[in-house]
Amino acid sequence: MPNALRRIGLAAAATMLVTVLPACGDSDTDATGTDPAATGSDQKITVYSGRNEELMEPLFEQFTAATGITVETRYAGTAAMAAQLLEEGDRSPADVFLAQDAGALGAVAKAGLFAPLPAEVTDPVPAEFRSSAGEWVGVTGRVRVLAYNPELVAEADLPSSVSDLTAAQWKGKVGVAPTNASFQAFVTAMVVAQGEEKAREFLTGLAANEPQIRDGNGAIMEDVEAGRIAAGLVNHYYLGEIAKERGVAPDEINLKLHYFPGGDLGSLVNVAGVGVLKPAADDPDVREFVDYLLSVEGQTYFAEQTYEYPVIDGAPAPAYAPALDALTVPPVDLNDLDDLESTIALIQGSGLVP
């Protein structure tokens, strides 16, 4: 996807920045000199976040400081949050669903709960990172990788395909987080690309190879670095997050990232993204929130603070990760990753989850 992440014009982003400047002077007007009440704004929104509080709260505070709009948030895992939305239906108090993978967004869209987003919101984002029907839009890109401890795995022994991790040489050496949304999205992609039987064969083989089961990617990274696990399937940005927490450079952490070559499914590029619930379709505060996530300011937060790839032009790339357009990634349509229920059943049936 040559230059896929750098297409948006700066003009649109600049316009958004103008609209989110903090209000001053007259307390009844916003930054544009407009009375929020006159536009239908109540200066608050409710976000269901499948991304964790530690990651998102600073961005929400940044948004509130810029706009005066407060963000009421409910946090849970992405799959759990999607399930809650499906259960609540049109009774949900949520205005926005912020998810960490396209599959969960697709599942909610398939239930008819999302309002179509305006083209001026979605068009700046590359087509491969948004709903083909305009029902959700990606806000960051995330690449699946194999994190490995260089003291336990020689570079020459790294697998060329994620499917190779079912081989005997990896027995007991690979960490996986089967309840994590990113792992589930990867499995769904395998079903889409290779069929359910191939995906079941991979999962069963992986389970038989006695993997190290962890609750999340962070735990896998910690154990790989400590040498308790030789390697693990995670997303690329965890290395940057750990380095930031410790105040060191990523290359000072005792693990490395392997990007599966040749378009292998092990290097699936997924997105974190947002969808707007139908009752909030015309809420100006919600629109401002989505615009902010896709502004240069919002995208820079993700690139610099979470090390994910921006999806618009004008924001910096994550510092240590290879350029996305330098990778050969699998041609999976993220619109096809919406069958969460079947994926979870498939993983449970493999024995990876009790």
Image: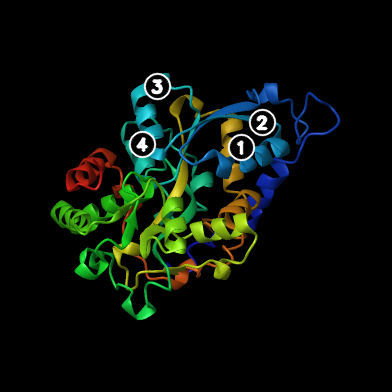
Given the image, on which type of amino acid does mark 3 rest? Asp
Residue designated by label 4:
109
- Please state the horizontal and vertical placement of residue 290, each as a whole percent of the image: 56, 40
Q: CA distance from mark 4 to mark 1?
A: 21 Å
Residue 230 found in image quarter? bottom left
Given the image, on which type of amino acid does mark 4 rest? Ala
The answer to whether residue 312 shows anywhere in this view is no
Residue designated by label 3:
90
Which one is nearer the viewer's eye here, 262 or 31?
262
Which one is nearer the viewer's eye here, 239 or 81?
239
- Residue with the most extreme top position: 91
Q: CA distance from mark 3 to mark 4?
A: 13 Å
Q: Relative to 180, say whether 80 is above or below.
A: above
Name the secondary structure under disc 1. helix
Residue under the image location 36 percent in, 40 percent down = 104
Task: For the residues labelled 2 and 1, say whether their Cβ atoms are less than 8 Å apart.
Answer: yes
Q: How many marks?
A: 4
Q: Which mark is residue 288?
A: 1
